[in-house]
Image (cartoon, grey):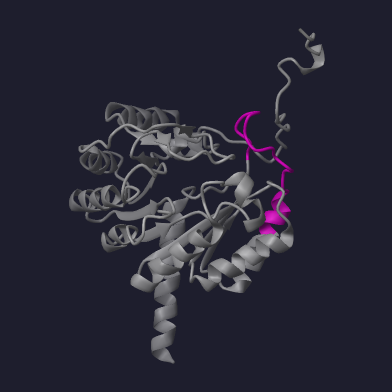
Amino acid sequence: MKARHPEKVNNPINPIKKKPSWIRTRILDSQNYFKTKEIVNSKKLHTVCQEANCPNIFECWSKRHATFMIMGDTCTRACAFCNVKTGKPSSLDPFEPMKIALATKELNLKHVVITSVDRDDLYDGGAEHFSQIILETRKINRLTTIEVLTPDFFRKGDAYQKVVNANPDVFNHNIETVPSLYLKVRPGSRYFASVNLLKSVKEINKKIFTKSGIMLGLGETRDEVLQVMDDLLAANVDFLTIGQYLQPTVKHYPLDRYIHPDEFSELKSIALSKGFLIVASSPLTRSSYHADEDFFKMKKLREKQAACHQLQ
């Protein structure tokens, strides 16, 4: 038997680069942080904050904001950037719609974000379950606005329409990266399937705000990022989020580089000039980070636009 090379034993596959000084998070209110944790755990709910190892969990939970992740903690896909575990998911929890509704009420959320794992094992990708959760949440939280961050419902036909018909205030689906990296970063997804999903949502209901996000630092070029902006605008997407990819472990897709905050600011200016209603762009920006504040800004902007059109 050949001797193993000592230098190769336990060698990380993709070493994690040291984080720069501008990527730092903190707990703002420890009492609220632990109260949020208690509410989530007592109802045996999953959050993307925990499962995806979000860097903003301390800040958001300190404000009693949490992004609920429905349909379990196990995804049927294996995206190279994601920290959510992959495998065979368990059955859907029939009580989850009520649990989410009650947790939203206990946290006194004015704006709630609900996302999920991919459930390719379900005939409709979980669209009906999303619909039930939206309807149940609204039933006992009438003043709370609802934002969904959905999978792409790839190869599920018009199943996504169940979610649209439940009338969420925001329909978010992340494009994640540029087309050239899809087969490596999102092998189970297709770029234009995601773009077309967002376009179809807006065609069905123009009143629903649509939103999408992209990560930087995976090896994309500037021109590719600008092209993604154009593709999303062609799909009538209202809101764009741009954030830094943070490699979760040595087994995940390798980080190409950390992007300086100035570059994020420049991309925000470009995206706004192109026509997006709202753009959130910073190293720590994530889909649900400051989602409540951004939603109400977006709502005011649309109301202002409508008033201007009436005057013309």
Q: Which residue is located at x 25 percent, y 38 percent?
A: 96
Q: Vertical placement of 70 versus 158: above or below? A: above
Overall secondary structure of the magenta stretch?
A: loop
Q: Vertical placement of 122 versus 10: above or below? A: below
Please identify the quadrant where the C terminus is shown. Answer: bottom left
Residue 15, position as x, y percentages in the image: 72, 29
- In the rendered structure, which segment of residues is drawn in magenta? 246-265
Extreme residue in the bottom direction: 312
| Residue 205 in sight from this viewpoint | no
Q: Vertical placement of 111 versus 25: above or below? A: below
- 101 horizontally vs 149: left or right: left
Residue 198, position as x, y percentages in the image: 45, 64
Residue 136, position as x, y percentages in the image: 20, 49
Q: Nearer the viewer, residue 23 or 127?
A: 127
Within the image, what quadrant is residue 3 found in? top right
Count of numbered badges drawn on the protein: 0
Residue 250 lies in the magenta stretch:
yes
Please identify the quadrant where the N terminus is shown. Answer: top right
- 67 horizontally vs 134: left or right: right
Residue 25, position as x, y percentages in the image: 58, 36
Q: Nearer the viewer, residue 217 or 156?
A: 156
Q: Vertical placement of 187 versus 250: above or below? A: below
Extreme residue in the left direction: 139
| Residue 267 in sight from this viewpoint | yes
Q: Which residue is located at x 38 percent, y 88 percent?
A: 310
Q: Which residue is located at x 28 percent, y 58 percent?
A: 162
